[in-house]
């Protein structure tokens, strides 16, 4: 039997036997004194097993003492009672009688005090006893280790308090079974769940905190499985090989798969990625003194193989890369951005509400000149369409870059010589027809010099054949052109934009433009249903910000689903998409490093993107 099994045996067996035995006694109504003698024998067995157990444990802490002390107290009471010394008090209906009928209550009081008192007075929680068996010594002094143990200790205090409470029941079977159920079926599985849950929560909050408890590269490597974020790994199956040189010479690899991470000495035959680093540099990365990205850009470390894994290291191990903001910093940044944004509101925004079920056909006019999969506009817009489809709508994408659309030359032939007919016979007419057939048109564009891209504007300009040349007073009271007979007066439009800078207020002029058109442009006018803007859009295909990307795209899907189901998108969803949770200083810094890399290495952005398998910082 290995030590882990032995530990479980010593921990669980006495309690199980003890409770089963006590239950039997209650059922078969064995006399009080026979019962207490048997109970005493088992108590002694529990003490012996705990002493053996204690000898094997690293932390000489309260646990064994608490259990042994309680049982010792109880056996001595029985012993003296048997000698007739306490007989009188036993017959009383007082505390002694209660102890005799429910001897475990002494044990649970003792366990409750053991779990509750030490952390309340700033002492080490009893769970150190178990935790030190499985967590390497270098983590024992960390805040993470302490907080996780304190929470688990309080959790067990509740379990022991409930176990104690059950002893007051008149039903003996209930009183003996409830603690077993609470401890073995609730306490043990819940602890197994709570430990990694708390570790991840805390590791997330503490990302970027110095890890000065690490003193060697080897220690840092061996410790990596303990800071591994299972959730961030998802179904990732990879091997990361390390070659550490200089002060320490280490060959070892991390194996990640099925949500687990393990460290092994040696060289893996087919690693997914290899990191070569001098020991002092690796230690600095692990201690959060320099970021892994920095080290790479400054050529202090060498990465070979699947580079995208290097970008995920921060998420997987919480060290050495850009960090998602702490809650406090995020709040401060949000307030600051809100102020910037409220200072920038140019025009009041009215949104048109469609009827639930009105949207059956959605047309996306995607104006980024970049290819699908690379274009952030397209990535966000496709997530939105996916949501529309999941709610039952039909969708179609027109990529303007694939279309032949001439620039309007302002000849007004379409208003004079051939009314309604443009001099060009290109793809513009076909797109307009598709728009007429759609229930919702999504105009999607990246921000180019604080406006929409020229191809979209060029397309909009080609819509004037659908207007009459005459000047009339429009609904808003301003001058406009009437719609030519046979054309739809207005259509339902959603505007979707992405931009490189991290403030949403950069979209002000785009928003103002669309709202102005909506109020004054006859056939070209829009019923604006929603505006979806995403600043700092570079994170949408950048491996550094995996979690954030997932959050934003999920919300874009929700937006698509909502517009089809209810005809409108909740403000919280729009705000969630626009919210920049990434530390803006780190974001700017990383973007600048990407540009530096391009310039220094003579690479285009797309070449660097290929290496990163993501766009790490184009404006
Ligand atoms: C010509 C040009 C002008 C740009 N102007 C701005 C700008 O004014 N503000 C901004 O935040 N980003 C600007 N950007 C950055 C893009 O909006 C950003 O990279 C966006 O993510 C590109 O989207 P796409 O990948 O869908 O093409 C500009 C990019 C280019 C190429």
Image (cartoon, grey):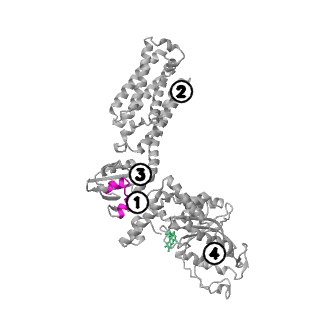
Q: Position of residue 45 (x, y in %)?
A: 38, 24
Q: Position of residue 455 (x, y in %)?
A: 55, 76
Q: Secondary structure at mark 4?
A: helix
Q: Nearer the viewer, mark 2 or mark 3?
A: 3
Circle on res. 209: 3
Residues packed near mark 1 inside 10 Å, few (<14), some (14 to 19) or many (20 plus): many
Which residue, given by chain and number where applicable, does mark 4 sit on? Answer: 433
Query: What segment is highlighted magenta in the picture?
Result: 281-297
Q: Earlier in the sequence, mark 2 or mark 4?
A: 2
Circle on res. 311: 1
Circle on res. 174: 2
Q: Quadrant of the N terminus?
A: top left
Along the horizontal axis of the image, is 65 left or right of 182?
left
Q: Secondary structure at mark 1?
A: helix
Q: Position of residue 441 (x, y in %)?
A: 62, 69
Structural distance between the alpha carbons of marks 3 and 4 = 57 Å
Main secondary structure type of the part rendered in magenta: helix
Residue 105, visible in the rendered structure: yes
Compare residues 431 and 501 and report the one nearer the observer.
501
Q: Nearer the viewer, mark 3 or mark 4?
A: 3
């Amino acid at each position: 039997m290995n030590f882990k099994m032995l530990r479980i045996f010593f921990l669980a067996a006495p309690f199980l036997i003890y409770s089963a035995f006590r239950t039997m006694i209650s059922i078969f109504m064995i006399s009080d004194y026979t019962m207490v003698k048997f109970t005493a024998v088992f108590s002694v067995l529990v003490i012996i097993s705990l002493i053996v157990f204690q000898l094997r444990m690293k932390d000489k802490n309260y646990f064994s003492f608490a259990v042994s002390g309680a049982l010792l107290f109880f056996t001595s009471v029985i012993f003296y009672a048997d000698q007739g010394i306490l007989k009188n008090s036993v017959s009383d209906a007082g505390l002694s009688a209660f102890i005799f009928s429910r001897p475990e209550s002494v044990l649970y009081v003792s366990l409750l005090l053991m779990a509750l008192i030490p952390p309340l007075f700033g002492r080490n929680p009893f769970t150190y006893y178990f935790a030190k068996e499985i967590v390497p010594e270098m983590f024992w002094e960390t805040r993470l280790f302490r907080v996780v143990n304190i929470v688990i200790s309080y959790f067990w205090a509740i379990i022991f308090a409930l176990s104690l409470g059950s002893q007051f029941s008149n039903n003996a079977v209930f009183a003996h079974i409830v603690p077993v159920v609470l401890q073995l079926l609730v306490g043990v599985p819940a602890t197994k769940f709570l430990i990694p849950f708390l570790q991840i929560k805390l590791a997330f909050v503490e990302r970027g905190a110095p890890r000065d408890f690490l003193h060697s590269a080897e220690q840092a490597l061996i410790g990596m499985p303990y800071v591994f974020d299972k959730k961030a790994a998802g179904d990732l199956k990879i091997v990361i090989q390390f070659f550490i040189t200089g002060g320490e010479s280490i060959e070892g690899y991390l194996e990640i798969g099925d949500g687990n991470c393990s460290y092994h000495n040696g060289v893996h035959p087919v690693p997914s990625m290899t990191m070569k680093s001098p020991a002092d540099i690796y230690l600095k990365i692990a201690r959060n003194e320099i970021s892994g990205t920095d080290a790479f850009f400054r050529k202090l470390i060498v990465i070979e193989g699947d580079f995208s894994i290097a970008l995920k290291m921060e998420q997987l191990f919480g060290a050495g890369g850009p960090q998602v903001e702490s809650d406090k910093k995020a709040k401060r940044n949000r307030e600051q951005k809100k102020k910037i944004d409220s200072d920038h509101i140019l025009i009041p925004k009215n949104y048109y509400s469609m009827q639930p079920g009105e949207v059956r056909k959605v047309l996306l006019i995607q104006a980024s000149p970049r290819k699908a999969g690379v274009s952030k506009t397209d990535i966000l817009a496709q997530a939105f369409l996916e949501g529309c489809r999941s709610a039952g709508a039909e969708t179609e994408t027109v990529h303007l870059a694939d279309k032949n659309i001439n620039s309007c030359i302002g000849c007004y032939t379409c208003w004079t010589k051939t009314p309604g007919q443009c001099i060009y016979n290109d793809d513009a007419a076909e797109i307009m027809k598709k728009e007429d057939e759609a229930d919702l048109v999504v105009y999607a564009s990246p921000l180019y010099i604080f406006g929409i891209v020229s191809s979209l504007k060029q397309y909009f300009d080609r819509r004037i054949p659908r207007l009459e040349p005459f000047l009339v007073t429009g609904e808003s009271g301003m001058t406009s052109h009437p719609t030519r007979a046979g054309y739809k007066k207005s259509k339902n439009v959603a505007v979707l934009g992405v931009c490189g800078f991290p403030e949403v207020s950069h979209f002000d002029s785009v928003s103002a433009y669309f709202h102005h058109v909506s109020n004054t442009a006859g056939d070209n006018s829009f019923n604006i249903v929603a505006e979806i803007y995403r600043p700092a859009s570079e994170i949408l295909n950048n491996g550094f910000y995996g979690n954030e990307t997932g959050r934003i795209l999920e919300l874009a899907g929700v937006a698509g689903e909502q517009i089809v189901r209810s005809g409108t998108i909740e403000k919280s969803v729009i705000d969630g998409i626009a919210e920049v949770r990434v530390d803006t200083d780190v974001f700017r810094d990383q973007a600048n490093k990407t540009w530096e890399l391009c310039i220094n290495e003579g690479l285009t952005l797309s070449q660097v993107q290929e290496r990163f398998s993501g766009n790490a910082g184009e404006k």
